[in-house]
Amino acid sequence: INVVSLDSVLPEFLVNTRFAGIALFEWLGVFVGMPMFLLLAALLNRALSRLIGQWRRHYYRKSDLPNPQILPVPIRLLMLAGVIHWLLAKLSLPLLARQFWFTTAIILTIASCVWLLICLNGWGEKCIQQRLAGRNLSGATSMLRLARRVVDVLVIFAGLLVGLYHFGVNPTAALAGLGVGGIAIALAAQKTLENIIGGVSLIFDRAVGVGDTLKVGDTLGTVDDIGLRSTRIRTLDRTVVSVPNGQISNVSIESLSARDKFWFHPIVSVRYGTTSGQMHAVLEGIRLLLAETGEVETESARVRLLRFGVSSLEVEVFAYVSARDLNQFLEIREALLLRILECIESAGVQVALPPQTIFIATASALTESGLNGSLKTSSARRRTSNQVSAKSA
């Protein structure tokens, strides 16, 4: 219990001098020995980092490569805990000193392991982010950040449980209380959890991507960012609408950017009085135009006389156009509409105008309806003003 094998090695004043019942050499070991060991480990880490960094730059022929961390702080703490265990096995110390140094080594081991796992988790997140950087998956990056935070919290919580178990504290009651508290928090944050789960489902399904043009309900715009709680959409008015992910996952989404081809479907109206020969010429000219246009899908293209309308003969033009984006499709559609107009004009046919109804009223009707009423009103006003002026006089 009290024997110390260092009596013959250390000076007598280091062994016999005590503060709070603890020998002076133990105080020196805590406040001098441990900091000195960490300082030497830091110097060793700097030397090894420079040496291996120079070798990496020479081997990969890249002068901008940084020096790696060979001995990070968690590894140094683990080394210190190992040295303490080794010294406890080699030296004979009093019982209280052995308990103190053994507990110190255990605390250093738990803290260094938790710290090292958190560092490894962050390193894994950076590696996955580099892989996802060129795939335009900002939502996956947000989910990855959340997963890292959750794993960090679980690692810290596991370290606390191990420390409590080492000191003889039973964490069963605390775990039961945390379970009940977690249920209460989940019920209170139901909408938030719904949005987070909706964001995770959107990210995994990859139904929406940054830069896509979407129509969600009455909102039409381009996706700026996909977060865990909401998705920001830039509208055509250049405003930003934040739509909760829970709402997006429960409604129908129309992705305009996912179109593999564009629908060209104008209805051409020509005047009545067009002969059958002219109509044949118009139909054949439009069909030939669609067949000669390389961007038009010939298998789906059709031109038909649709119906005898109220004021015109209606011709349906149906085709799919291959284009890389909306701007190119608008350019192709403009050229096709101009060529269709040329086909109509070359056949001697005119485009029908929409019917209009104009109501014309005669002067007598205006006099009987509106003018007489206005004259009666004005005369009544004049009589009332004359009566008021007479009374005042």
Image (spheres, grey):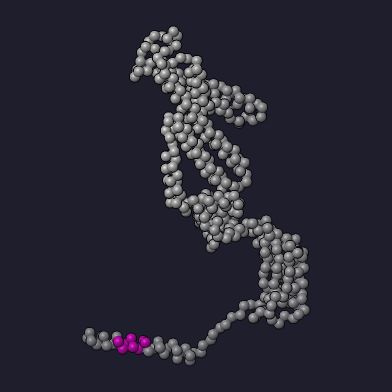
Q: x%, y% of residue 191?
A: 47, 54
Q: Quadrant of the C terminus?
A: bottom left
Instruction: Looking at the picture, tell me which residue is in the foreground, 240 or 87.
Output: 87
Residue in view at x 41 percent, y 90 percent: 372
Q: Quadrant of the N terminus?
A: top left
Instruction: Looking at the picture, tell me which residue is in the foreground, 307 or 115.
Output: 115
Residue in view at x 37 percent, y 11 percent: 16
Instruction: Looking at the picture, tell me which residue is in the foreground, 157 or 283.
Output: 157
Residue in view at x 52 percent, y 55 percent: 246
- Quadrant of the rendered structure where residue 18 is? top left
35 above or below 296? above
Q: How many marks?
A: 0
Instruction: Looking at the picture, tell me which residue is in the foreground, 390 or 145.
Output: 145
- Quadrant of the rendered structure where residue 144 is? top right
Q: Horizontally, is 6 left or right of 125 in the view? A: left
Residue in view at x 63 percent, y 28 percent: 57
- Reply yes or no: does residue 380 show up in magenta: yes
- Reply yes or no: does residue 226 show up in magenta: no
- Quadrant of the rendered structure where residue 358 is? bottom right
Kindly report the secondary structure that dominates the magenta region of the rendered protein.
helix
- Is residue 247 visible in the rendered image? The answer is yes
Q: x%, y% of residue 220?
A: 56, 60
Q: x%, y% of residue 188?
A: 43, 51
Q: x%, y% of residue 261?
A: 68, 60
- Is residue 238 visible in the rendered image? The answer is no
117 above or below 254? above
Q: Horizontally, is 184 left or right of 382 in the view? A: right
261 above or below 378? above
Residue range corresponding to the magenta coloring: 377-384
As drawn, which residue projects farthest toward the left? 393
